[in-house]
Amino acid sequence: MKLDLHWRIFIGLALGAILGYFFSVSGTDMQDPSLGIVKLSHISWIGDLFLKLLKMIVLPLIISSIIVGVGHLPVQSLGKVGLVTFLLFKGLMLFAAGFGLVFVNFFKPGYHIDLHSLIDSNPAADDVKFITESSFSFGDLIFGIVPDNIFKSLAAGSLLQIILVSILFSVALIKVKNGKMVLDFFKACLNAILKVTHWIMAISPFGIFALITKTVAIGGLSSLANYMPFVSTVLIAFAAMILVVAPILVHFFTDFTPLQFFSGMKEVMLTAFSTSSSAASIPITLETLEKKFNIPNKIASFVIPIGASMNMCGAAIYESIVTLFVAQAWLPEPLTLTQQIFVVGMVLLATFGTPGIPHGSLITMAIVFQAVGLPLEAIGVIISIDRILDMTRTMVNVTFDSLSCLILNKMFKNLGDNFPEQADIELEESELSARILPKNAGESEANSLTY
């Protein structure tokens, strides 16, 4: 009997963790450990290839999906849709940042670690200095959303810049003569890219197996031991966000039950966890929302690419916890409530858009650290244990991107005639399909949701 994709991905994760553990205890060079004649590099290239394949289709997918989705929105509704989407994103991130503060204040992980000695003994701490030497402001981050050369933005993979140009181009197509012909072209491109996504996901269990093997082999599990109070705080906060907050939002603000939501999101969550990339997860996220949850492409293609850059609930939780963790371990006096609220505001602004430069996420964290008066060298300490936490916070990011899409879909239904019906745009059916029924769905709805 053929196993479902999510089971094959899970098996790949488990086998990769087991094999990676044996590599990590082999006692050889940790950059390329070996088990007999088998070296890690003999396996890791499969994961690198899988990631390259996913990243290969991200930009074409974002461009075509946004142009198609926005192109089927009435111009008079675009501003309302954009405003509601932005407010939901920032509302969720504001809650997430405050949510992280609750856990870090309760567990107080910074009081269990001597950060001063860790910074002195960690060579990565000095390596952070060159990354954060330049002065960056929020004005620089916002100004950087507008590209001066779109081809340079494409080459650098600057998502926010690409999204902005795609939206402007799509709105222009609505206004010009024969614009529908160009929209039809991009619709065909989108269908072709989704087909390529199916082919790539067919090999995903092997790619994920190799990625996890490499992660555990090089990082090992022992490296987490010294930071267990901090790591445990982060993981418990992430777990509570997914297992408590998400089901509540799904139950009250979407047409689905929590069981239906998590059942449909299995492949997306496992892919996000293993790749540690919200952008690389966009293809499978779009496919899942459109085919398993019956979300119109015009909504999914608008919300998900933007959410990958602007709706980072996992990152908001993480940066709040990291900032308070470092403050607890470094400062002689704990931060006051007013200062902690200030941290939440700084995290919300700093995660608005990551600069399209190497180590851009470190710069956003550096802005928060500078504002609170914390040592930038502490970022180097965090980097040394960041891999497993990066995987989990990416899963949180992608989960809440998808949840936001379901919430917005239900909200947009209430706009009535101001929002076009799904019949305006239909993508081809795919093999990645399943039956996910809204709560209290009748037989006719069940038939319409079966692909």
Image: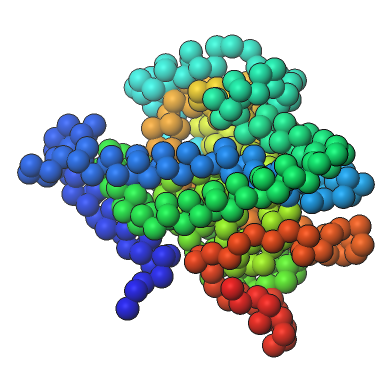
Quarter of the figure that contains the N terminus: bottom left
Asked if residue 253 is positioned above or below residue 337 in the image, the reply reads: below
Quarter of the figure that contains the C terminus: bottom right
Say whether residue 54 is left or right of residue 223: right
Residue found at x 59% / y 11% = 134
Kindly tell me whether residue 75 is visible in this rendering: yes
Q: Residue at the far left: name it.
A: 36
x then y, percent, for residue 285: 57, 55
Residue found at x 65% / y 75% = 449
Asked whether 122 or 436 is in front, the reply is 436
Asked whether 244 or 343 is in front, the reply is 244
Say whether residue 142 is left or right of residue 373: right
x then y, percent, for residue 143: 74, 21
Asked if residue 409 is positioned above or below residue 128 in the image, the reply reads: below
x then y, percent, for residue 365: 58, 29
Asked if residue 404 is positioned above or below residue 117 in the image, the reply reads: below
x then y, percent, for residue 295: 69, 63
Asked whether 272 or 451 is in front, the reply is 451
Residue found at x 68% / y 77% = 448
Kindly tell me whether residue 337 is visible in this rendering: no
Q: Quadrant of residue 117?
A: top left
Say whether residue 443 is left or right of residue 410: left
Asked whether 204 or 194 is in front, the reply is 194
